[in-house]
Image (cartoon, rainbow, N blue to C red):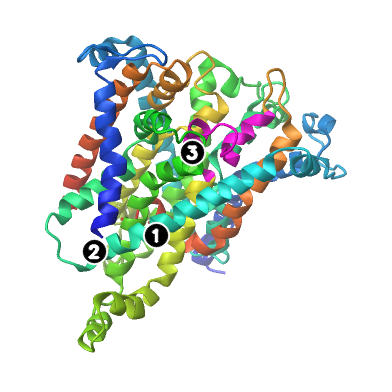
Amino acid sequence: MLPSILVLIALTEYPFFYALYISAFTWQIGSEPVFVGLGNYLEVLLDSGFWYSVNITAIFTTVAVVCEFFLGLGLALVLNRKIRGSGVFRALISVPMILTPVVIALVWRVMFNPALGILNYLLELVGLSPSGWAFHPKTALLSVALVDIWQWTPFVMICMAAGLEALPREPFEAAQLDGASRWQVFRHVTFPLLTPITIVVLIFRIMDAFKTFDIIFGITAGGPGNATETWVVSLFRNAFFFHNWGYSSASAIIMFLVTLVYCEIIVKVLRRT
Amino acid sequence: MTSAVKIRKTEDILSYCILFLALVWSIFPIYWIASMSLKMRVDIFRMPPAWIFTPILDNYAEVFLHSDFPKYFLNSFIIAISATALSLLGGVPAGYGLARLNLRRERDVSFYVLSTRMAPGVAFLIPFFLMIISAGLYDTYLAVILMHLVILLPLVIWLMRGFIEDAPRDVEEAAMVDGCSRLGAFMRTTLLMVLPGLASASVFAFLFSWNELMFGLTLTGINAKTAPAAVYNWVGHTEVNWGPLCATGLIQLVPGLIFFVFVQKYLARGLTAGILK
């Protein structure tokens, strides 16, 4: 037990402190590091590009998680009617979750192609005007969010379906006796009972959407321009394309701190429920 | 037929329609990549799509006979197997400790493991990358395996903790009363009970490593390159070689599709690091 915790600490704390150390220098590979103290943090926090990418991340996360939640909950309610074959449906609908993200990103890139992709072909077939999808700055962010929704709605679905299955029967029988309508039952009985599981599902979806890299990198690599440059993607670009190690380490440290605060809040919320 | 039955029937039909639509929507991209991988270059981008075509295996021949992909798949496989084995080696005892021993500071450890599950990989990657460069480990299996362990250890610890907590204590305690050591008692009783959990934790670990792009892309060059990172080899400066790319992609998806059958039951658990059961 102890050794593996120590290994984990070595694997995570050491890089953390190393990043803390690097973040105090401006450092380009090939030249001598120059000590700048908190300069990099100031640079990050005063950089409009940084706040732009935070904003993009917020939009991406909100759109994706809200859609995933309601679609997933809807599908879970349908599955919960337990019609014949619903187990098979549930399994097959969940498949996107375990697929290699970079591969599906590339498939979606083909399908998004404005001139030769299947999506615009289908739009024209039903008489709608074609879209630029991931290749147009205005629609790119929503397009990558769509792929996230495609991949992770099933996650909400299976969690909520499991939650629905585990609900006690008595409150429903009581509500039925009282003559409550189905919407009233859902609104005042089902949904409140699902609150704990809803919180867990949202906690994970929010953080994982926030972290999304492969999908965005595989479809647009942050483009066109910087239309889909989330915080994670912009951090990656700054480090591995432009080799701004000091700047990106400072940004990484800020990201660590945000994660820690997020986890503190989660633990408080989870204890309460 | 009473009206209640009628309503029920209509709702059943509606349910089937919704589920069927969701099914087609979820599966279509897999069908699409499979069909592209079997098409000739001219057919791939034909619009309206060539729904009926003569499948060819040229793209697979190119992947297996005229490219470095057999090597990249082997790399990915070696890395995924090693990372999985190491994460079990460390994660099972740690999970046992959290579940069964009354540890001081257990809350801190739990919080710590949870925060590693939550932190974005790119934040670890930047310092890790620089350390790997200065340690001379760039483009080795070890570099990628270590980086994957950062993600897999907390995952396995957390999952195993949950599975072990669910297994009854008394059998193990009885074995200890009968003179087994703690390790012996664990191996003979609890371990056998959590074997399905152990298997699904291994599958999650393997699939994470097998599917992972960012670390493979940055920590390797030519020798230890993983298959997901190498997919970009088909993307040239002027054009993308879609046929072989899709063939590679489909092969890449196969382990996930096979293992899916086994871990389906534990999906929610695996993806929330054991918090949802």
Dot 3 and dot 2 within a common chain: no
Label 2 crowd (10 A; few <14 / some 14-19 / many >=20): some
**Gap in angstroms between the C-alphas marked 3 and 2:** 37 Å
> Residue flagged by tag 2: what amino acid is it?
Gly
Residue A91, compared with residue A198, is above or below; it is below
Residue A45 vs residue A7, the one in the foreground: A7
Q: CA distance from mark 2 to mark 1?
A: 14 Å
Left or right: B11 as drawn, with respect to A22: right
Instruction: Classify residue B203 as left or right of residue A4.
Output: right
Residue type at tag 3:
Ile
Q: Residue at coordinates 75% horizontally, 38% vertically from top-left?
A: B36
Q: Secondary structure at mark 1?
A: helix
* Tag shown at residue A149: 3
Q: Nearer the viewer, mark 1 or mark 3?
A: 1
Residue furthest to the bottom? B178
Specify the farthest residue to the right. B54
Q: Does residue B84 appear anywhere in the picture? A: yes
Q: Which residue is mark 2?
A: B97
- Name the one closer to the observer, B201 or A79: B201
- The quadrant in which residue B259 appears is bottom right
Numbered range of the magenta stretch: B211-234
Label 2 sits on a secondary structure element that is: helix
Q: Residue at x 46, y 32 (%)?
A: A213
Percent across and percent down for residue A21 are 24, 24
**Amino acid type at mark 1:** Leu
Label 3 secondary element: helix
What main secondary structure does the magenta stretch of the protein show? helix
Q: Which of the chains bears the disc numbered 2?
A: B
Number of on-image labels:
3
The numbered mark 3 sits on a residue in which chain?
A
Q: Position of residue A187 (x, y in %)?
A: 30, 50
Tell me if mark 3 has few (under 14), some (14-19) or many (20+) residues whose alpha carbon lies within 10 angstroms of its own. many
